[in-house]
Amino acid sequence: MATWDPSVYLAFADHRTRPFVELINAVDLGPEQVASIVDLGCGPGHLTQYLRRRWPDAQILGIDSSPEMIEQASTENDDPRASYAVEDVSTWLPAGPVDLIVSNAMFQWVDDQWNVLDRLLERLSPGGAIALSVPDNAEKHAHRSLYELASREPYAEHLLEARRLQHLGADQYLRFFTNRGLRVNAWATTYLQILTGDDPVFTWVSGTGARPFLQGLDDDLRATFVEEYKAMLRAAYPSESFGTVFPFTRTFAVATKTSPA
């Protein structure tokens, strides 16, 4: 299992924050309608402040499977109505009904996410909403190059179990939630992110999709893998005078549970 480094993840905090803000702004629930929020895959807790601004009186529970992320979230957040816990969402359920379930860039890592979502919907309050976003870049250069390199020797035998991300389109979430009777707003956005610094695309993916691959190699193999991967990324995403353009697509869905008549 990969471990996660909050400092690497937060290297591009501004780029990672914007989709979250756009996601929660699409939730059509006012402060008086949300008493409880669960943030699944809350990471280092840097996004709690945005939930608090939208829903000032809600109890917020942040869940993440990474002890490193939860330690930072617990240490750096002093919100008295927010708490954080290490949990595996594939088996975890909230103790009682929840008005809003939020997830930013987590469900792409969840095995059998559709069954997990089905279980979570059982705990969603009538009139409540689930709002999620996931990256959808499995077919883009950064990931194709990663998977191609990982399939070559001498790396392949060490990386058979490293997780390859799948295409997750807005239409999949639209159909899933609509078929369960929820009102759904689903869409996709491609951000033309301008990254700066040396090998910035590698730095981006090393904190997310490439991390299980890097951790699956010993130090010597990792060093050669990194150099080959960086070269592939530099060719696919050339540096320009203003920085490196990195198109990044995210899928969004906000599904609201209809209140009984």
Image (cartoon, rainbow, N blue to C red):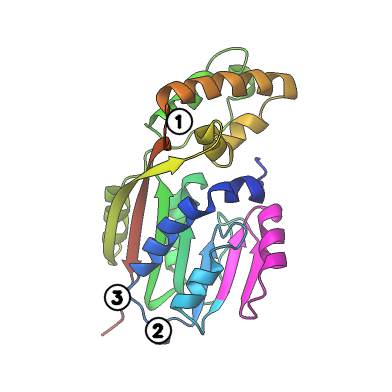
Quarter assignment of residue 127 = bottom left
- Measure the alpha-carbon separation of dots 1 and 2: 40 Å
Residue 65 in sight in this render: yes
Q: Residues within 10 Å of mark 3 (few under 14, many from 20)?
A: some
Front disc: 3 or 2: 2
Q: What's under tag 3, amino acid-wise?
A: Thr
**Magenta-tinted stretch:** 60-87
Q: Which residue is mark 2?
A: 33
Q: List x then y, in percent, for residue 252.
A: 35, 55
Residue labelled with disc 3: 258
Q: Which comes before the other along the chain, label 3 or label 1?
A: 1
User: What residue appears at the point 40 percent right and 28 percent down from the top-left corner?
Assistant: 141
Q: Position of residue 144 (x, y in %)?
A: 43, 26
Q: Residue furthest front?
A: 241
Residue at image point 60% right, 36% down:
211
Q: Amino acid at mark 1?
A: His
Q: What is the x, y in percent for residue 87?
A: 64, 59
Residue under label 1: 143
| Element carrying mark 2 | helix
Query: Residue 134 magenta-drawn?
Result: no
Q: Is residue 22 above or below residue 205?
A: below
Q: Relative to the observer, which residue lies in front, 236 or 68?
A: 236
Residue 63 falls inside the magenta stretch: yes
The front one of 168 and 5 is: 5
- Residue 152 vs 26, above or below: the answer is above
Tell me which amino acid carries mark 2: Gln
**Residue at image coords 72%, 60%:** 71
Q: Give the position of the N terminus as an image quadrant.
A: top right
Q: Which residue is at the far top? A: 153
User: Marks 3/1: CA distance?
Assistant: 38 Å
Q: Secondary structure at mark 3?
A: loop
Establish if 184 lies above or below 1. below
